[in-house]
């Protein structure tokens, strides 16, 4: 291990301010870094991969790794976007209701995502009866754990037309094993006016999330140290004494601290005693080189392989969540199966442009461990500060929320708060 890069050249008695080393530049790490610099702390940001964003990153060709949407209920994520000057880049493509095509009978409709819009029969989810509505309300209340499918066993049409798509989108877990209690937490957040507004990045995660976050941090003097994979935490007396990056190390002073904002398997490698999820669900994303002449659109599909179709001027992205059965498909096989579904929903809702029979060139992106599996099993609840000078961040560290952008921001801000309350000097 080579000499420490931060401490070796520092003269004894140096008055340099305390440093917080944020390890991991995904959304959780970016949120933690922003909260810390806004509180006047010096931050050093480390990232193992070539770029920032984690599982909400832009790919080298400019496309996103997958479709990431926000809701009006995601207040922490929206507050983060506002703080980095990126809120205007997230648009509401379907303010009149979500266009949904049912491939089983080829019927289409616009569905209001907010219960406040269900007064109109035309925008009401299929199968929504008085009994189904009461079941939704009961689900929003704390109760015994069971699967989402069990909770809606008496309302199969509502399960298929609304609850299961919401479950797969929010929990990335199939309804037969997904936690009804966790879905209830999502539904509670959707009850307020404006909470169900659906927002997507107009240009992509690079220009509308990652780049403005890095630019804002750079204005505070925070740079990104990419290619910095943490190999080991050197511990001493219940604290982190040094960060071992393999080819170099950083020795921590008593006043320095660490935010570990890594996925659960990396956190377990470094802190094997910390409770963390070990079962994960995949997501398959397919990006078609299909230019569109119209505005950003977001459409839903039932009864097919595709679930969500995001149409931007530069291309069409399709998401298959809880993709255990399809993540292994080749790019060609996935395109052959998915393109006819995309073509039909685009034509049904009158999207402009040519939608040819043959699929355009496509690229699949597979996140095999996209999120923890949100089943009825108790979720691990890791301590926010497992070591005296280290706080954990990451969407998996918030057990009462599904692993989403919202949970990532919440966790990053919580990690920063935990360290600040612990008295990190300025």
Image (cartoon, helix red, strand yellow):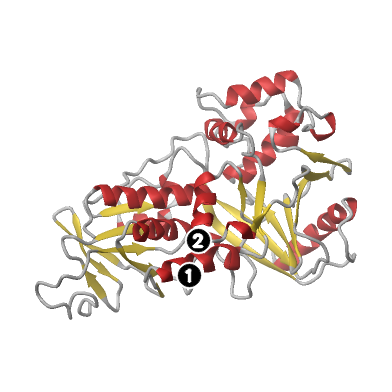
Q: Is residue 410 above or below residue 162?
A: below
Mark 1 or 2, nearer chain start: 2
The residue at the far left in this view is 12
Q: Which mark is residue 242?
A: none
The CA distance from mark 1 to mark 2 is: 8 Å
Q: Which mark is residue 215?
A: 1
Q: Residue at x 9, y 75 (%)?
A: 12
x then y, percent, for residue 221? 37, 71
Q: In which quadrant will I find the C terminus? A: bottom left
x then y, percent, for residue 369? 52, 55
Q: Is residue 212 above or below residue 185?
A: below
Name the residue carrying label 2.
Answer: 84
Q: Secondary structure at mark 1?
A: helix
Say whether marks 1 and 2 touch (CB < 8 Å): yes
Q: Is residue 181 left or right of residue 362?
A: left
x then y, percent, for residue 366? 61, 62
Badge 2 crowding class, 10 Å Cα cut-off, few under 14, some 14 to 19, many 20 or more, is many
Please indicate, yes or no, whether residue 273 appears anywhere in the rendered image.
Answer: no
């Amino acid at each position: 291990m080579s000499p420490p890069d931060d401490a070796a050249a520092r003269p004894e008695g140096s008055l340099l301010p305390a440093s917080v080393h944020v390890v991991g530049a995904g959304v959780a790490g970016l949120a933690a870094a922003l909260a810390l610099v806004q509180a006047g702390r010096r931050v050093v940001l480390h990232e193992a991969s070539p770029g920032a964003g984690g599982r909400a990153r832009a790919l080298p060709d400019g496309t996103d790794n997958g479709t990431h949407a926000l809701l009006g209920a995601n207040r922490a994520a929206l507050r983060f976007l506002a703080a980095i000057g990126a809120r205007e880049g997230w648009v509401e493509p379907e303010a009149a209701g979500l266009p949904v095509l049912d491939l089983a009978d080829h019927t289409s409709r616009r569905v209001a995502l907010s219960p406040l819009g269900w007064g109109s029969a035309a925008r009401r989810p299929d199968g929504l009866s008085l009994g189904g509505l009461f079941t939704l309300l009961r689900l929003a209340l704390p109760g015994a754990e069971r699967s989402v499918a069990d909770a809606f066993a008496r309302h199969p049409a509502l399960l298929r037309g609304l609850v299961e798509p919401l479950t797969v989108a929010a929990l990335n877990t199939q309804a037969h094993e997904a936690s009804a209690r966790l879905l209830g937490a999502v539904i509670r957040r959707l009850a307020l006016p404006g909470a169900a507004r659906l927002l997507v990045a107009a240009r992509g995660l690079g220009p509308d999330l990652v780049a403005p976050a890095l630019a804002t941090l750079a204005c505070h003097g925070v740079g990104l140290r990419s290619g910095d994979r943490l190999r080991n935490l050197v511990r001493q007396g219940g604290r982190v004494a040094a960060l071992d990056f393999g080819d170099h190390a950083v020795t921590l002073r008593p006043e320095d601290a660490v935010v570990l904002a890594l996925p659960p398997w990396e956190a377990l490698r470094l802190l094997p005693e910390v409770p963390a999820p070990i079962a994960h669900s995949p997501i398959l994303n397919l990006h078609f080189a299909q230019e569109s002449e119209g505005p950003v659109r977001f459409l839903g599909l039932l009864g097919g392989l595709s679930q969500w179709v995001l149409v931007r001027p530069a291309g069409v992205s399709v998401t298959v969540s809880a993709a255990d059965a399809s993540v292994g498909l080749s790019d060609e096989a996935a395109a052959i199966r998915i393109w006819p579904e995309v073509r039909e929903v685009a034509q049904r809702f009158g999207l402009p442009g040519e939608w040819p029979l043959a699929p355009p060139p496509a690229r699949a992106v597979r996140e095999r461990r996209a999120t923890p599996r949100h089943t009825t099993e108790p979720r691990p609840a890791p301590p926010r500060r497992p070591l005296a000078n280290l706080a954990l961040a990451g969407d998996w560290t918030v057990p009462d929320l599904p692993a989403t952008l919202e949970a990532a921001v919440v966790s990053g801000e919580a990690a920063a708060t935990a360290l600040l309350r612990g008295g990190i000097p300025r």
